[in-house]
Amino acid sequence: ENLSTAILVATVYHFIGSRASLNVWNPRVASPNEFTTSQLWLLGGGRDDFESVEAGWMVNPKLYGDQQTRLFAYWTSDGSKTTGCFDLLCSGFVQTSTEVALGAAITPVSSKFGQQYEIPVSIY
C-alpha cells in the first residue's frame, strides 16, 4: 500500500467551504479493487458517525470500469455506514454545471518531468 496524505484540520465554528488546486495524474491501479485519488474532503461530526463531502479526481476501475482519471464527488451523512454515493449515482447531488460533468474523464493529465495540469475544486 502506497499512501500519501496531507491534512489541514480547521477547528472553527462557522465556515462556508473550501477550495484547492489539484495536480492531475493518471497513476496505474494494479487491481480492480484498488483506487487512487486526489481530493478536497470536508468532514464534520464524530469519528464513527461523520458527515462528509469530497470532490477531486480519481482512478477507480471498479466504479468506472476503466483506468481513466475522472472528476468525482462523494457524500455521506453517517460515516458511510448506510449512506454515501459517488457522482450522480443517487439523489445526493444535483448537476448544475453544463460545462463540467461528474464522472467525466479528465484530460490532459500531468507527466513526469513534463507538462503539469491542475483542476480547481471548490466545495461550498
Image: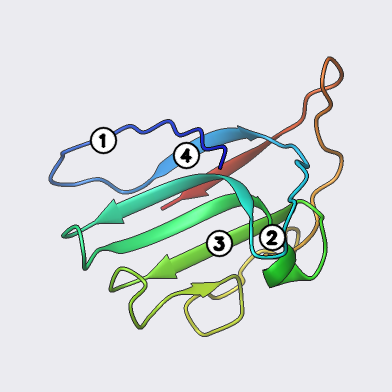
Q: CA distance from mark 3 to mark 1?
A: 20 Å
Q: Which residue is mark 3?
A: 73
Q: Which of labels 2 and 1 is toward the front?
A: 2
Q: Nearer the viewer, residue 58 or 28?
A: 28
Quadrant hosting residue 84: bottom left
Residue 19 disc label: 4
Which of disc 3 and disc 4 is earlier in sequence? 4
Which of disc 1 and disc 2 is earlier in sequence? 1
Which of disc 4 and disc 2 is earlier in sequence? 4
Residue most extreme to the left: 13
Q: Which residue is mark 1?
A: 9
Q: Which of labels 3 and 2 is toward the front?
A: 2
Q: CA distance from mark 3 to mark 2?
A: 13 Å
Q: CA distance from mark 2 to mark 4?
A: 23 Å
Q: Which residue is mark 2?
A: 60
Label 2 SS: loop
Q: Is residue 2 left or right of residue 42?
A: right
Q: Which of labels 4 and 1 is toward the front?
A: 1
Quadrant hosting residue 9: top left
Q: Amino acid at mark 2?
A: Asn
Label 1 SS: loop
Is residue 11 depicted above or below 84 in this figure? above
Q: Nearer the viewer, residue 17 or 81?
A: 81
Residue 105 disc label: none
Q: Is residue 57 left or right of residue 109?
A: left
Q: Amino acid at mark 3?
A: Ala
Q: Amino acid at mark 1?
A: Val
Residue 56, position as x, y percentages in the image: 59, 49
Label 4 SS: strand
Is residue 116 depicted above or below 61 in this figure? above
Q: CA distance from mark 4 to mark 3?
A: 14 Å
Q: Is residue 89 left or right of residue 70?
A: left
